Amino acid sequence: MKAEPAHQLRLLDLQETDTERDRLNRLLRALPEEEQLRQCEARLTELRDQLAVTETELRDLDREQRKVERDIDQVRARAERNTQRMESGQISSPRELESLQAEIELLARRQSELEDIALELMERREEADKRRADLDRKVTEAVEERDDAENRRSEAVLRIKDELDSATQRRSRIVKELPEDLLNLYERLREQYAGIGAAALRYGRCEGCKLQLSAAELREMRLAPPEEVTRCENCRRILVRVADSGL
């Protein structure tokens, strides 16, 4: 295949542009900002789950507290009624008085137990309340961090897409300058060889596979007409002769 030396050199510009486009596309698929955003979202989800558990605990404690307070009121009311009966002088039977006194003592012990439970519930609720306040603060901070990470991700995506658009426009301009057969060969080789279809020959080395050409290969390259499209014998990519090829 033959192509003007200027077209062959322009092919290197196309390769450089395509390499840059490939790099930008890889970056879009694996943005550091994307990973940071995922970490922020995971942290926020974890904190919200903890907050939901704590709020459920608080509701349960409130329900237990109300029940204990009702029980205390009932025990206290019964004890007061029994005390009033004893003090009224209406009960003359010693046995009935003894039974009533025993019940009053039992109710007093029960009230004391319930009040201890109520105190414990109150302390547990205060602790849970502190945890909720702490989690509320952490959730607020995590939301701000998530929003910041989302903004950084969006800015990074926009920046990369702008660069990608510029590279794509540059590619379109270069493609219009190249002969169809040279472009088709380049595209085919680029697909076959990891995105690199053309490479420069610099100081006797192929920039595509990074291997040094033999003396015989260099002599053949030196003797080939400038318009001859040459290929690297090692990687089979288009090998473009440049000013510092070392020929």
Image (cartoon, rainbow, N blue to C red):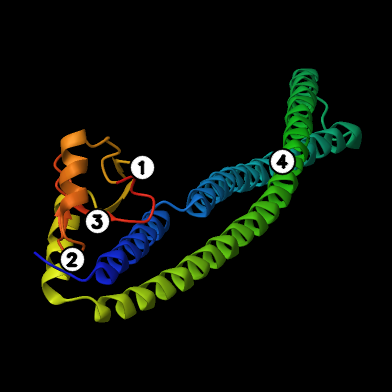
Q: Left or right of 189: which side holds 119?
A: right
Q: Disc 1 designates what residue?
A: 203
Label 3 element class: strand
Res 210 seen here: yes
Q: Is residue 84 above or below residue 178?
A: above
Q: Residue at (63%, 57%) from the top-left corner?
A: 143
- Badge 2 amino acid: Glu
Residue 139 placement (x, y as % from top left)? 65, 52
Q: Left or right of 107: which side holds 47?
A: left
Q: Disc 2 designates what residue?
A: 227
Per the model, the C-alpha gap separating discs 3 and 1 is: 16 Å
- Whichever of callouts 4 and 2 sits on the residue coming sooner in the sequence is 4
- Which of discs 4 and 1 lies nearer the camera? The answer is 1
Label 1 element class: loop
Q: Is residue 18 above or below residue 173?
A: above
Count neighbours of disc 4 (C-alpha within 10 A) and say few if under 14, some if 14 to 19, many if 20 or more. Answer: some
